[in-house]
Each structure stands twice: as C-alpha cells, then as structure tokens.
Image (cartoon, grey):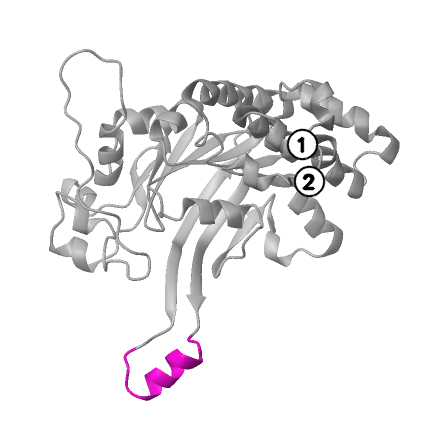
Amino acid sequence: MTQDTILTIDGVSKRFSKDLDIAERTARKLGAKIAPVTVHAVDNVSLDIRRGEVLGLVGESGCGKSTLGRMVAGLAAPSDGRIVYNGQDVAGLKGAAARDAALKIQMIFQDPMSSLNPRMRVRDIVGEAPRVHGIVPKGDVDGYVEDILNQVGLDPATAKRYPHQFSGGQRARVGIARALAVRPDFLVCDESVAALDVSIQAQVLNLFVKLRQDFDLTYLFVSHDLGVVEHISDRIAVMYLGRLVELGDAEDLIARPNHPYTQALISEIPTFETGKRSYHAIKGEIPSPLNPPKGCHFHPRCPHAHDRCRLEVPVLREVAPGRLSACHLNDRAA
C-alpha cells in the first residue's frame, strides 16, 4: 500500500443557515429577539487521507461526520476551506475534469432502500451510470453489470429484480455495486453497515476488505460504532460537534486513547473479556450545533475540564509520533 496522499481536507467548515421568513422579519422589527438560524455542522477540519488506506471517521450522531463525508463526495459544498483530490482543488475543476473527479469519488449510503430507485431494476441501477458516462459500450452493459454483481457476491440472475425484492444485506451489496460500476478510486462509506444485523454486518465488512484489495480502493469509513471501525480501519479520526479531536493509527488509538472523548467512546465498546467491567455512558448529551459551547466543545461533558477549556479552543497537534489530539491536558503533561 502506497502512503502518498490522495485527498486533503483543508480547513473545511460547513454551516447551514435559514433566513427569517416574512412573519419573523416583521416580529423582529417590532422588537422581538429573533435571529437567523445557523447550524455549525463542521468546524475547520483538516485531514490528509493516504492512497489505499481505510480511514475510519467516528463520533456520536450529530457530530458532523456524515456532512463531512458528503462534502468529500461532492454532494455538498464547503462553506469555508477546500477539498483537494490528487493535487487538484475539486471546487476549481470544470468540464471533463470535474466529471472525472466526481466519478472517482463515490458514496455508499446508510439506508440502501431509500438510496435505490424503487422503480428501477438492479441492472439499470448498476448499469445506468457506466452507460451514460461511456465507461462501457451500450451493448456490453448487461455483461458488465453481471461481472460487478459477481464481485459483490450477488447472483447475476437477480439483475432483473427490483430493490424491494432483496434483503437488507443484498440491498447493501447493490449499493456497493452501483458505486463500483463507475470504477472509482475512493469510496465514502456513510454508516454503510449500521442498518444491518450483526451477522450481515460482518459479511459486508469482509466484502469491503476484499474489494479494497481487488480494486486498490481508498475508503473514508464513517460510523458511530467504534467497534466496527476498529476492525476495518488503518487510522481512526474522532469527531465531536464538528471538530476533529483525535487522529492516529487504529490499533494504537484504541489501546492508548489520548482525548477524554475518545477514552469515553472506547470505554463503551463491548468486549469478550472475563471479569467485572463497569460501563458508563458519556455524561450529558451532545450540545446543539445551533449554539455550540465556547472553548473546547467537549468541556460541558468532560470530567477533566478546567477554566482554560471553557475559553480557549484547543489546537489539534502532535502528541506522539503519528498521533494528533486537541486537548489542553496535553499542555499540562508537557
């Protein structure tokens, strides 16, 4: 596996704003304290992803990880910052270059049932994009679709079926086949096994591992389940309320978490170890992205928070070789 960078996320932020309607603007003129609503979904995230690796992106629901994945896949534009793919700023690409970049980065969605057109047969779901973009001649599409279905473990005879005629695990494989059909280099997997039974999850995860080797793929694997990410990722990035709080080698990060939030997440992973072990949910609830806390976003829930945490945003910096963390406790340790 080569270690050169395939994709760079450079200072990326994403905000969703809702302007005031007529009634709200009128009420504001009459003295009501009403302001436009802004959701701070992603806050100044910078990250390099190496060619051929699996980077796991984890965090609680609402932390912004799926929004970041959608920006990487080109389904949403950053409010600030840039995304660089193979040395080129994706936002600056035009024409054929923009199309090629869009095809090379594909997304696999959490719910395959809602992401597959219920009125299309599988052969059309998988074969439409390669036909439209001239990846395969029109006369070769059926054979091409059969090959792709074989690659993901589906019987080619099922190509004439509709999505509702498949099980959840089979629909997940159809979604993977659709993404592979345009010959991508990079897959954004957004909670791609979250809706599946545990036994089916294992099968699909094994499929991801096999496809990575067969097609020389790079993955951004988004999940709220650190236990799942642990088994497939080379490195793990931990997000909390729109910010990256820790990044490191998967095995090392699980064994020696640095950030208090990462420590809390890992303490909740079920294990088969014998002996007594107490599980404690992370204190409190994740704050609203409409009004995130000042300073370190995690400080209202952190057992180690002190005055500096409430005022100053911690910088993501190297705390050990290959390990980055954003916590003021590292300054005390130094």
Marks 1/2 in contact by CB < 8 Å: the verdict is yes
The quarter of the image holding the C terminus is top left
Q: Position of residue 290 (x, y in %)?
A: 32, 61
Q: Nearer the viewer, residue 12 or 41?
A: 41
Inspect the magenta stretch and tell me whether residue 22 lies in it.
Answer: yes
Q: Nearer the viewer, residue 46 or 42?
A: 42
User: Quadrant location of residue 170?
Assistant: top right
State the residue at coordinates (64%, 25%): 215
Give the residue type at disc 1.
Answer: Tyr
Whether residue 238 is situated above or below residue 169 in the rendered picture: below
Q: Nearer the viewer, residue 222 or 160?
A: 160
User: Quadrant location of residue 256?
Assistant: top left
Residue receiving disc 2? 119
Residue 322 in view (yes/no): no
Residue receiving disc 1? 162
Inspect the magenta stretch and tell me whether residue 80 lies in it.
Answer: no
Magenta stretch in the rendered image: 20-33
- Left/right of residue 40 with respect to residue 307 in the rendered view: right
